[in-house]
Amino acid sequence: MASDNYNIYEPLRATLEEVIEESTLIKTFVLIPDEEFVFKTGQFIELAVDGVGEAPFTPSSSPLVSDRLEVTVMKTGYVTGIMHELKPGAVMGIRGPYGRGYPVSEFRGKEVLILGGGCGLAPIRSLLFTLEHMKDELEKVILCYGSKTPADCIYKPLFTRLNSIDKFEAYRTVDVTDDDWDGPVGVATALLDQVKVNIENSVAVVCGPPIMMKFGTIRLLEMGYRDEQIYLSMEKNMSCGLGKCGHCMMGEFFVCKDGPVFTYREIKHNPEIWK
Amino acid sequence: MYYISITKEDWHRSLEKLLTSHDIFVPVKDEFSLDYEPFRLSQAENIAYNTPKPATPLKNFFLPVRENVTSVMSNGRQRIIIGAPNCDIEALKLLDEIYLDEAFTDPFYRNRRKSTLLVSSDCFSVNDHCHCTSYGVKPYTTEGADIALLSEGDYLFLRIISDKGEELIRQLSSAAGVNDPERLRFADQRHSETEALLAELNRGLPDYRATGEIVRKAGDNVWVKYASKCVSCGACTTICPTCSCFLLIDKPGFEKVKQMDACQYPGFERVAGGEDALFELPHRFRNRYMCKYVWRPQKFNSLACTGCGRCIEACLGRISKNELFMELT
């Protein structure tokens, strides 16, 4: 990185191997990077469609795999719209990894409570792979996840698998039900009422749409979590990923470089975090 | 730091010789403005030394408005930029913190910094909106440039600040050391005169730290009031020597074009889903003040406003940040 020839703006090429439809609006792109690509769980990449644009995503695959990368993308705007039209064989651009991910070594010996919503399960899946790998060092891992409808839930097989792993528990809810759904109905935050967790020896991770991040944090605080026990994965317009372009400023922080994962304690002084 | 002296004629002849290996820019005054122009010996008499301040902020030499950042980097010719006032030299410190950051050094910025020799110019007068001293910035340079220049009659006195500056001086055969301190008394006198003018001009303006506090505490009504005259043109950020935000634009072949951008433009913080924390104009307007006086000072060691006053001169709505501060003080 210190080399004089290293260009921070130059993307690495990656070939699209497979496109997995997770829901009507969400697809997972399986990429084979031209070079080994190493990242830490919770860090993000800038994924580019050639000549169109790039957008920030946290890989949803395991950080233990470096020759294959999975990125789960919700069709939201211009770039993701075109991304969703890509077919296997397409060449994409990757810059990164950027930012500060989850400090998983600090989770050792603890219970990890994860609250996720919608496409927020993408970074969480990567975190879950990491936590599974280190499960002998953890007390417990609990996932509470909500999607709008049963059909909007991504990685459905993941829940069955998680519930079969020792020390892991996974719960699902939906905002709006359909005929085939016999599980809980309501916001993801409501699932927190049914989990048994030793808050004193626990950390909480929240990742999802802004509204869920806000009310999830409020609920966790009510449950007795301290500010520094709550990890939030913030989303802003991260254009460069390098702490320079200024688009992702959140108070004094560049979310791309100082985050995207922050403890609530680090950012709570800024009234603009939920905007 | 020490001084050498050289006649203006010899200095300009020496610059002429250096043109074979360097691009040289000097501050030239015409009837409308003062700005950098490429040095030409035939135009030497129009160079305005020690006069605040070139219309173009110094940052433009290091951060072009638009550049392809995936193109092959050329080593580029060596450059000498003459005439930057200390407010602009001071502003480079923040740009260095951002662009020379160890984790992600911008190679284009770094190469331009490396290949540029800076000859700053002490200010012997003030413009209407100059207020560097409010932010602890002197109207003359003692660090951050390679050489500082003072004009006195037919002579130029050059204050040698860096090794790079000393190297250049070695190439000036007719430069002579200044051993008699009496010959430099004018420098101290000029500095104090300019500082006195600035003190008089800016009586009542808060200093930088106090500015941050009053900006942080300011109520919405102030932002709404001043933003009512703002048209989001971005002139203030374009002309600001420390504003350095940009947008990366993708071009076919995975090329990236880096284009200067600003929080004053609509959509700056908009995300794909449509949320935009700076959608309302008063929020955008306030953002620039919060950035310069509250957030950047929390995060960086360098000043994010050096009191050059260009934003006041450039504003289409005639918004004066100094008036805003006075109202809040």
Image: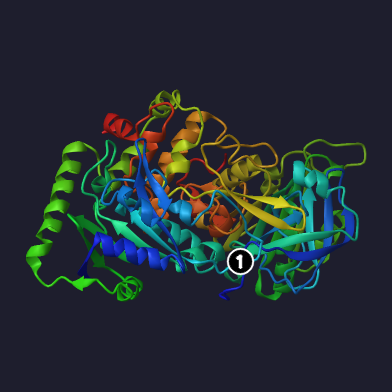
Q: Nearer the viewer, residue A1 or B56?
A: B56
- What residue appears at the point 30 percent right and 74 percent down from the top-left corner? B166
Name the image quarter holding residue B290.
Answer: top left
Residue B140: percent from left, percent from top: 24, 55
Seen in the picture, residue A124 relative to B267 is either above or below; the reply is below
Seen in the picture, residue B234 relative to B58 is either above or below; the reply is above
Q: Residue furthest front?
A: B42
Number of residue marks: 1
Label 1 crowd (10 A; few <14 / some 14-19 / many >=20): few
- What residue appears at the point 45 percent right and 23 percent down from the top-left corner? B228
Q: Nearer the viewer, residue B147 or A75?
A: B147
Residue B73: percent from left, percent from top: 61, 66
Circle 1 is placed at which residue position? B73
Name the image quarter holding residue A96.
Answer: bottom right
Q: Residue furthest left?
A: B182
Q: Quadrant of the N terminus of chain B?
A: bottom left
Numbered disc 1: what chain? B
Q: Nearer the viewer, residue A48 or B261?
A: B261
Q: Quadrant of the C terminus of chain B?
A: top left
Query: In the visual, does B128 lie left or right of A161?
Result: left
